[in-house]
Image (cartoon, rainbow, N blue to C red):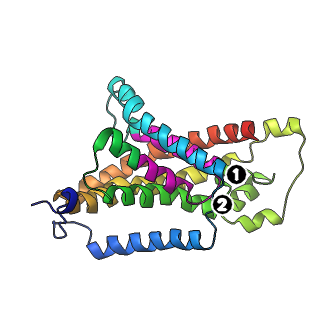
Amino acid sequence: MSGFNGIEGDVNAPGEIPIWMAVLYFIVVGGVYVAALATKKMKFSTLDLVYIGIGGALSVVLEFYVGPIFSRAIPKIPGLDISFGLRLFMVSIFAAIIRKPGAAAAMLALFDILGDIFHYGFGGEPIYLIYEAFTYGFFIDLVTFLSGNHLFGIGMKKMSASKTLLAGFFPAAARFSTVTISEEEEQKDLSWVPLVIVQAIVIGILVSTADPIFYDGFFNPFLYGGVVTWSALIFKFVSYIPWNVITVFLAGIVARRVAKVLG
């Protein structure tokens, strides 16, 4: 029998991730965001909030209305989810433009709320909101934080490709070497490419864990008593990675162009 809001609360399904592990993860991630808010590390301007609203709303449009059109036209390929890819593409772009940890989680939370209003309904909430914000959103925010708020190298000082890559994960490295280039040279500058590739790989791998590991491995059995088959989960995880990496890489290229136009 279903419990609160359609949540069965099954914690004994065969193969299900132990509830203490899931609870510990979400407590830690939630604590990170609370600490960031308390220390004003996650302070958004009015413009940031506008971008978050646009990014969240466009993600809903792409996932539920545009994605299905392409999905019907493209043959099924393991790991390729057009609708999710469009959402990941849009959230990654706006997270890079906003350049503040918490932006991705906020967009995914808004996506969940709007998705419930226009598509799913509110059954299973607030579990889905927590899942969206603290998995997909957190993974993008984590890389944003590690980059010193320079996701895809946006806003970073000009450096060699190797030092740009290093500064993308160890921001202090940016203090030790900078170069000055002319506007013409900047048009041909590709020092950011290795960083975008590596950040796309990291984000792509991380977000690929959310659906098979977090949802299929815990939330599906917890909410609905679903069966956990780890061989299928591992296959899904591996098959998602290349498509998610490609999606984030393309988002990085577009985000850099958009950021340049916005100044």
Q: Residues within 10 Å of mark 2 (few under 14, many from 20)?
A: many
Residue 169 percent location from the top left of the image: 65, 63
Residue 246 in view in this figure: no
Query: What amino acid does circle 2 point to?
Result: Ser
Circle 1 sits on which residue?
153
Q: Furthest-top residue in view?
A: 73
Secondary structure, mark 2, is loop
What residue span does the magenta drawing correspond to? Answer: 84-112
Q: Residue at x 39, y 49 (%)?
A: 112
Q: Residue at x 53, y 53 (%)?
A: 104
**Badge 1 or badge 2: first in the primary sequence:** 2
Residue 186 in view in this figure: yes
Point out the image quarter for the C terminus: top right
Q: Are marks 1 and 2 in contact (CB under 8 Å)?
A: yes
Residue 228 figure quarter: bottom left
Depicted 16 relative to depicted 246: above or below: below
Residue 162 percent location from the top left of the image: 73, 56
Circle 2 sits on which residue?
147
